[in-house]
Amino acid sequence: MTITNARTAAPSSRDRAGKRRRYRGIDQLGGLDRLVIILMVVVPTLLLIWLVWFPAVGSVILSFTNWDGIGPLSSIKFIGLKNYVDVVTIYPPFWPAVQHNLIWLAVYFLVATPLGIFFAVLLDREIRGTRIYQTAIYLPVVLSLALVGFIWQLIYSKDQGLINGLTGSTIDWYGDPRFNLWAALVAATWKQTGYVMLLYLAGLKGVDPSLREAAKVDGANERQTFFRVVFPVMAPINIIVLVITVIESLRAFDLVWVINKGRNGLELIATLVTQNVVGEASRIGFGSALATFMLIISTVLIAVYLRIVMREQR
Amino acid sequence: MARPSTEAEYLARMVPSSAAGVSRRSVLRGALGAGALLAAPPLLASCSSSSPSGSSGGGTAPATGTVSLGSNQSDATPKAAVQSVMDAFQKANSGLTVKINTIDHNSFQENINNYLQGAPDDTFTWFSGYRMRFFAAKDLAGDISDVWGNISGMSDALKKASTGDDGKQYFVPSTYYPWAIFYRKSVWAEKGYKPPKTLDELKTLGAKMQQDQLIPIAFADKDGWPAMGTFDQLNLRINGYDFHVSLMAGKEDWSGDKVKKVFDTWKGLLPIHQTDSLGRTWQEAAQALQQKKAGMYLLGAFVAQQFTKGAEQDDLDFFTFPEVDSTIGTDAIEAPIDGYMMSKRPKNEDGAKKLLAYLGSSDAQNIAVKADPSVIATNDKADQSGYTALQKKSAEFVKSAKSIAQFLDRDTRPDFASTVMIPALQSFIKTPDDIDGLVKNIQQQKLSIFTT
Amino acid sequence: MTTSTLKGKPTTATAATRRPLTPGRVGLQVFLIIDSLLWLFPVLWAVINSFRDYAYTAQHGYVSFGGFTLQNYVNAWQQADFGRTLLNSAIITIPAVLLTLFLSSCIAFVVARFSFRFNLVLLGVFTAANLLPPQALLIPVYRMFRSIQVPFWFSDSGTLLNSFWGLIAVNVAFQTGFCAFVLSNYMKTLPREMYESAVVDGAGVLRQFFQLTLPLCRPALAALATLEVTWIYNEFFWATVLIQSGEKFPVTSSLNNLRGEFFTDNNLVAAGSVLVALPTLIIFFVLQRQFVAGLTLGSTKG
């Protein structure tokens, strides 16, 4: 059944045959209908603005204050860029946190994503048990990242963990700052790979099989087919996967928090924000400055994501 | 008509006035029994500030109704201890019931800001020191100076520790425990060790222990705060109590020579401390002491909780941190005080004050220390005959001290303690080399925080 | 149309590729088997150890066999109060999922059905919301919730803070974007003629929505429901910061109780982890198709 997209075309109300269509879009709606539509749009939008966008702006504004969270809003004093200067110059955990976030991103980008794509390509064929393999690999995706931290503790624990039990070493994988970031990253990659694989598999299914056939006819082998034909065609998916990779690495929090609240080698920007605003510390202004860093980076990424996705909509 | 501030009041108002009076209390009891989880909150000041709702009923009748208590004693033993104390209180005051709201120990402290500004219980467990004064100054705690008028048996030092910046009392001490260096008597007798009196003796002892295949000083700082104990002891010994208090109040230069000396001395002691401390919790370090793998542990008396009651706990002994500077001596100690406070707008003020008076009395404290033998009572009149050997020594220890500090994270601003000192101390322990850079950075951050 | 299952491509000329058992093929299978086992291993290890007695493993180490017991599960259930926390999770998750799906269908319906100038902007606003880091929004949300007073039957703390509804609202706000996006894609594929005949019959927008659109969207809704239940159930950050009384914690945050102040009994933690994972694992295995469809719907066009 062909689906005419006359909707998205210019608001002409004539179909191909030139006959007048009966329905012309929103302008033809009666009173009740209009009300319903307005409600259907306004209610969710208001919820979103209230709980997402308004707080985002609020955080940015608070980052210019030195508020400690106690007392009425009227007691807030503005101190300009002082928080930002402090964060960047005299706050020791900040630069390590940035570094760790970048390492996190690098590992996701260089290990988890390619691995996921690799598995997706492997499992895209008709082989026996493909369903089982896929299930095994994306099983971790349904687990909460906090839970992942607990499960891997059985492997990483200094006295009771499997690694030390098998190798006899006494390294405290979660507690030694030389290793704990990598230990956490292994666990996180374990989960992320399945997610990427899933997204990519779906994308691969959407690739026109005739392209592959054509490549085969031309004598290309598997690898060449993938890199020269399939991969370029998957450009939108590639970018989406990339953006998701970056965003997930920026949001990494749960895993590290349950290990040791993000200290001693596991500092991440998200944990620094939480340490500063949750708890007795209550350095709201300062924490908001850290949060604004996260927001800025996220916004850039979101803009990229939206451009891709919205372009697809047209 | 003021907005009802408890669910019970709300429901009670639905009872027609003709049936009010006696039935009001039964309505209150029924409403509370009907599963309301938390006693509902006083109003927030965002609306017009109406007068705080007083106790139920009116006039000068003896305090009745329910008093709520927010408790951070979430582990089994302390929780049971609190329960027994409250049971005894209710027995002695038949008109009052206490509703205990137990919150996980760490979460309670972490959420204290939110808790106090949100829907705090009438009374709550807390600590004395700057942490208490901080909230009093921010208008989040209730003035209980009149309760202090009725408490006897508290030393002046304790009263001072319970007083806010404005001279009024906001805190009722309940129990406390000293920080000292703990060891197992049997191990030391076997190896022929003697408690060191000076820093040099400590170092020598440490070297000897290493030769005997023991870890000299157990050490753990995964949670960030235990290392503050070591810092405090060194600072008290090297620079004295007054400097320490002043430093905690933000009035001294962290990058000055005095503080540098503390870190330098600490660096010299690190070789006899347990390694890899940043991945170890204090419980695990205490177990090293219990398993006779470590010779000593500088910790609060709660280290005893990791030892089984009876013979094992009796095997514990302690000595004060050795002297570093003979002009300063060892008469300053650390003994954090735990106790109770009243929230700013309690629903049952009379009941709350009565409860607090009871908690400061020797009766309540007798029950508390019996249930948890790692702490001692603050009231002089408490019955010390039931004390274990450790408790007796702790009581004597605290009594003979001239100055008592509270602990770094109770003596200074909470944001400074948790966002500056924890990372700083952890980084020092990890790489104790750049002391100059470390203290300079602490000073910079201190200036940033303390001026706000 | 990619509500595809994973059974593989339907009709491409693959019959021939199945049969020959070349060394390459065998190698591939072996490789995949090893990888699958590797991936399943941590979970299997946790499951095995959850059945082992702590005293036994303390004595013999973990690289041993024996000491099986169910006691860990009993202890974990009691210590972490799983009965209550699972109930809390249900109280939070189910309304949140229903609300999310409803609100996002509303938006998706309007965006897909009608064309007006701000279609894409609206969709963009929603999608972007899903991608912001929650830590950055914490304080304003927290303060707002604390200031909003609600009647007691709504929340027994008197405000939205420490109330289930507050947590539900935040989760709904965060997840609506993704669902709206997916549903709008899906709804765009519904034939326009269907609406036209409905209008001819005199059906208003409401009727079109409830009687035409939603029933037809059932596959997508099922897929999203599966996904959302998993995501909201697993949600950790907001549950930790917005809920303050121990008895209201949902199950994911309560896992911290098992680590407690004292000795970490890893077998106990393993049992607790399995218990926490169980609902999502069950959903996953039973509704796997929907789960996958949900994720893939979101990433590809229609």
Image: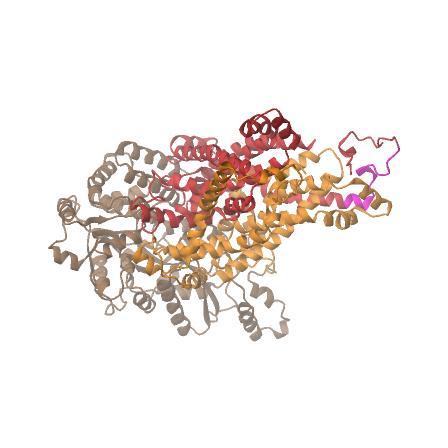
Quadrant (top left/top right/bottom left/bottom right) for the C terminus of chain B: top left
Compared to B55, does C302 lie above or below? Answer: above
**Position in image of residue C45 (x %, y %):** 42, 52
- The segment highlighted magenta reads A19-35
Residue A32 in magenta stretch: yes
Residue closest to the far left? B192
Residue closest to the far right? A19
In front here: B128 or A20?
A20
The quadrant in which residue B279 appears is top left
Quadrant (top left/top right/bottom left/bottom right) for the N terminus of chain B: bottom right
The tint of chain A in the picture is: red
Query: Position of B171 compared to A19: left or right?
Result: left
Query: Position of B120 compared to B166: left or right?
Result: right
In front here: C165 or B400?
C165
**Position in image of residue A244 (x %, y %):** 54, 36
Residue B91 in magenta stretch: no
Please name the residue shown 13% across and 58% down the image.
Answer: B189
Query: Tag count in the figure?
Result: 0
- Give the orange chain's letter: C
Please name the residue shown 77% across and 41% down the image.
Answer: C191
Compared to C266, does C174 lie above or below? Answer: above
**Position in image of residue A186 (x %, y %):** 42, 41
Any part of residue A64 in sight: no
Residue closest to the far top? A218
**Position in image of residue B439 (x %, y %):** 29, 35
Q: How is the image coloured?
A: by chain
Any part of residue C221 in sight: yes
The tint of chain B in the picture is: brown
Query: Position of A102 compared to A23: left or right?
Result: left
